[in-house]
Image (tube, rainbow, N blue to C red):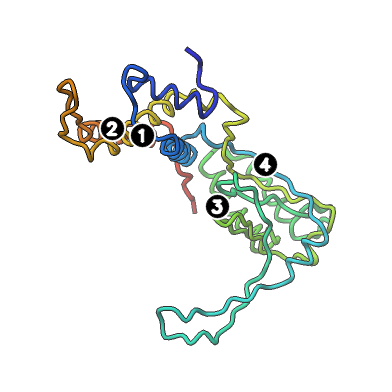
Amino acid sequence: MAIPNSKATLLSYCKRQLGYPVVEINVDDDQADDVLDDAFQFFEEYHYDGTLRTYLKHLITQTEIDNQLTNSTLTSSTQGGSDNGATNWLEGNNYIELPESVMSVVRVLDINSSTSNMFDLRYQLRLHDMYDLQSTSVLHYEMVQQHLGMLDQMLVGKPFMRHSKHGNRLYIDMDWKNSVYAGEYLVIECIRKQDPTTFTDIYNDVWLKKYTTAKLKLQWGQNLIKFDGILLPGGVTLNGRQLVDDAKEEITKLEEELRLGYELPINDMIG
């Protein structure tokens, strides 16, 4: 038996698990593709093997810097409210477009944060960090580091950032005119999806194979449920509802298994 290493081979594996070719699986090819896409989306959202924590760098151009200083006009809506649409707002274009594979941005690394001037505020703040080297408390060290990170943002000018995965935009709130120059690199720490076409071993993931099979069974049962109780030649009676019920139970157990056993823990905020 071939190990699944593509969409086609994974779907073939799932159909064999459901009885094909002994039993005809009444699922259209487009429906099967939708099932696999939904399974991959859930896998990427919650399974720790579906994403990768990595660093991405982007070379900043002068055109991008000039664009950060411009604004977009937003007009108030006239739909479903008392507003007459006459109010205009401006939104800064201080964003960089991100690849669609980026799920979330953890942080933006410091830009132009190095200094050799001992009278510089950043130097003094780092000098006061030295006492942490004598601390043996991990909790104390973590709390201090988080507070210093906030001080960096307030006093040193570490850029604030905002990101939404559905917008593919990373907003960076800083002085684009004086804090960054063309030819410098913007480096971010982010969580991005694993591409199964590159890392084909994902198709052979144990949980993903079981989950895709259960989702395919659900689709099969939903297709047959309209013919429930119809007697076929040879005395065979279709029972799509039983397939649906069994599939829903399997999906619920697999999703619970994923959330409890394979999902990364949420980071706690201290302070």
Gap in angstroms between the C-alphas marked 3 and 2: 31 Å
Q: Which residue is mark 4?
A: 55
Secondary structure under badge 3?
loop
Residue 133 visible within the image: yes
Q: Nearer the viewer, residue 199 or 246?
A: 246
Question: Nearer the N terminus, badge 3 or badge 2?
Answer: 3
* Secondary structure at numbered mark 2: helix
How packed is label 4: few (under 14 Cα within 10 Å), some, or many (20 or more)? some
The label nearer to you, 4 versus 3, is: 3
Q: Are marks 2 and 1 in contact (CB under 8 Å)?
A: yes
Return the residue nearer the eye: 266 or 227: 227
Where disc 1 sits, the SS reads helix
Could you tell whether 122 is left or right of 27 in the image? Answer: right
Mark 1 and mark 4: span between their CA atoms? 34 Å
First in sequence, mark 1 or 3: give its number.
3
* Kind of residue at badge 4: Tyr
| First in sequence: mark 4 vs mark 2 | 4
- Farthest-out residue, top: 1
Q: Which residue does the numbered mark 2 point to in the structure image?
A: 247
Q: Nearer the viewer, mark 1 or mark 3?
A: 1
Name the kind of residue labelled 1 in the image: Lys
Residue 126 position, x and y percent, is 71, 51
* Residue 120: image location, x then y, percent: 79, 60
Q: Which residue is mark 3?
A: 165
The tally of labels here is 4
What's the distance in space between the residues labelled 4 and 2, CA to CA? 39 Å
Residue drawn 56% across and 79% down?
75
Comes first in the chain, label 4 or label 3: 4
Quick one: SS at disc 4?
A: strand
What residue is disc 1 on?
215
Disc 2 residue type?
Answer: Ala
What amino acid is labelled 3 in the image?
Answer: Lys
